[in-house]
Amino acid sequence: MAAKLIKGTEIREEILEEIASEVSEIKEKKGVVPGLVTILVGENPASISYVTLKIKTANRLGFKEIQDNQPADIPEQDLLALIDKYNKDDSIHGILVQLPLPKHVDEKKVLNAIDPDKDVDGFHPVNVGRLMIGGSEVKYPPCTPAGIQELIVRSGVETKGAEVVVVGRSNIVGKPIANMMLQKGPGANSTVTVVHTSTKDMASHCQRADILIVAAGVPGLVKPEWIKPGACVIDVGVNRVGEKISEKTGQKVAILKGDVDFDAAKEIAGWITPVPGGVGPMTITMLMQNTLKALKFKLGIA
Ligand code: NAP
């Protein structure tokens, strides 16, 4: 294998240790800890397992964690009132509404009701705007793109002047990471191209990339011959391609594949993320980072 493996699981541990030590220092000096509330509506199994992991991580870091479960038929007005309650609660610094929401609820309305200063997911239009402006305006970069940038920077990949090609233009991954990489500043300062389903010649764009970030949700979309030798390849895709029996638990588990043909790509790239174990572990980590930031903003020490 030519490429260095970018292990999200290891980088996650590094960042969580940094967060835990900051939390205990702030607790000692100021007597407060970051407070995070997660609102889960209904019983979507994927949401439940994601939320469970968030709670576990928050507890490990010494956060105050509130898990607020609501029935699937909660009226929209009641959900908005709940958000208002947490907006006003001084011990809560971050509010997270687990998506997707049931169909009778207007997702946009709910997300926009969160106080932008407590929007640790970074999806509120105010925070999207702050991200666009860049520099010291940025409060909460959205978690998956923030995790991608950490993986690149902590792996020692040069971003200044690098050709970055992003495959995908979603609001949660493609657009924000493209915007973050073009900002003037450390860990960015790149020349960015975004490709999507209307792009004419995907291969020729990808072949130019010093850093190739792929977030399309199409297994094996990026072919090995699209990868520039020595490039850094970040595979965000998580695609369920089948099931297997876990050797550890004896239970059925999903077989996950990324958007890049990993086995072939690892022989050409300079760095590459695996799926699973690459970008995946970073999202919750960056949520914790944003929640700590929210407390620091409030204390005036950010
Ligand atoms: P999305 O909202 O479905 O957006 C996919 C984007 O990829 C769209 O912009 C689409 O183009 C583009 N695309 C799809 N097929 C393409 C093709 N054949 N050629 C070129 N572009 C193509 O997906 P998303 O939410 O960004 O997620 C993308 C992947 O990342 C998914 O596998 C998801 O599970 C994964 N993901 C992982 C994490 C994590 O690990 N923590 C977090 C978020 C997402 P158009 O705009 O033209 O339709």
Image (spheres, rainbow, N blue to C red):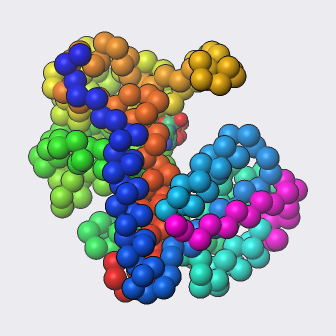
For the N terminus, the image quarter is top left
Question: Looking at the image, which is closer to me, 141 or 67?
Answer: 67
Q: Is residue 219 above or below residue 289?
A: above
Residue 234 visible (yes or no): no
Residue at left 59%, top 48%?
53
Q: Position of residue 42 (x, y in %)?
A: 80, 51
Residue at left 23%, top 48%?
153
Q: Position of residue 102 (x, y in %)?
A: 78, 51
Q: Position of residue 149 (x, y in %)?
A: 31, 49
The magenta stretch spans which residues?
A: 62-78
Q: Is residue 179 left or right of residue 81?
A: left
Question: Looking at the image, which is closer to me, 59 or 109?
Answer: 59
Q: Is residue 21 above or below residue 194?
A: below
For the C terminus, the image quarter is bottom left
In the image, residue 283 lies in the stretch drawn in magenta: no
Residue 185 visible (yes or no): yes
